[in-house]
Amino acid sequence: MADLDFGAFDALTFDCYGTMIDWESGILAALRPVLGAHGASRDDEQLLELFAHHEAALEAGPYLRYREVLAGALRGIGKDIGFEPTVEEQETFGGSVSDWPAFDDSAAALAQLKERFKLGVITNCDDDLFAASNAKLGVEFDYVITAQQAEGYKPRLENFEFAFARIDVPRDRILHVAQSLFHDHVPAKALGMTTVWIDRRAGRDGGGATPPAAAVPDLTVPTLERFAELATA
């Protein structure tokens, strides 16, 4: 574990889904009833890998609202494993973000960090869906940057540049905190940011709901709780 001088930072920016919100549990909980209705079956890791593939492909194309990205990912998964989701199933899955749970440590860790740092979020989501997730986190972010506002999705560098223009803190005094190497650490490191990897999948094979990627974060911790302990010590 590398040492960081947390006194060198005034603001923390976070990825939301996978870092603060347990999106893998939420995705699977929303997928299972659809597969069951169509008599289809795959194990959890296979489903998450399929989701990662289709979500990333859709996000790399022309801008779509995140609800539409999720609906398209469900159609792609259905095509891969042999079923066609109904329009209602697509709409329900598209709005399922509102039901995705927060990790147990997220709210307390964010409250602790808020006492020392300005907090921001740079999220691949729609404004209204993130607002529903934010209610589960119990903290008021100083800066909220969504894919809807940026009209595109991480790992685009433009999403981070868009955030820098909104955040009234020099970029070298912003620490980025995220779970996804693909969506967050690769672009953040390309822009010279210092990053902390919240390795929620520590000890599990594969990338889960994120495509594989290689990056070298400055610090790796397994939970937000541990990060908050270190950052506020």
Image: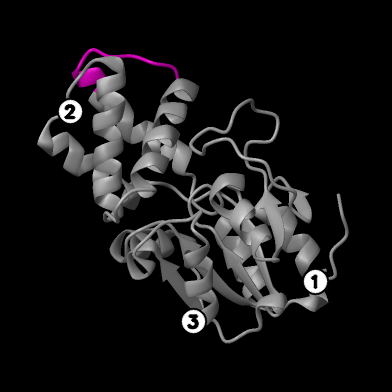
Q: What residue is rendered at 81% in x and 77% in y?
A: 7
Q: What residue is rendered at 63% in x and 42% in y?
A: 200
Amino acid under disc 3: Arg
Locate residue 71, reporting x and y percent. Answer: 24, 41
Amino acid under disc 1: Phe
Identify the residue under disc 1.
Answer: 6
Q: Earlier in the sequence, mark 2 or mark 3?
A: 2
Q: Please, what secondary structure does the residue beneath circle 3 have?
A: helix
Q: Earlier in the sequence, mark 1 or mark 2?
A: 1
In the displayed structure, would residue 129 be above or below residue 214?
Answer: below
Camera sees residue 140: no
State the separation of the CA atoms marked 2 and 3: 39 Å
Camera sees residue 1: yes
Identify the residue under disc 2.
Answer: 85
| Residue 16 or residue 52, whichever sits in front | 52
Magenta-tinted stretch? 35-43
Locate residue 188, reporting x and y percent. Answer: 63, 60
Left or right side of 119 for 83? left
Identify the residue under disc 3.
Answer: 166
Left or right side of 195 for 93? left
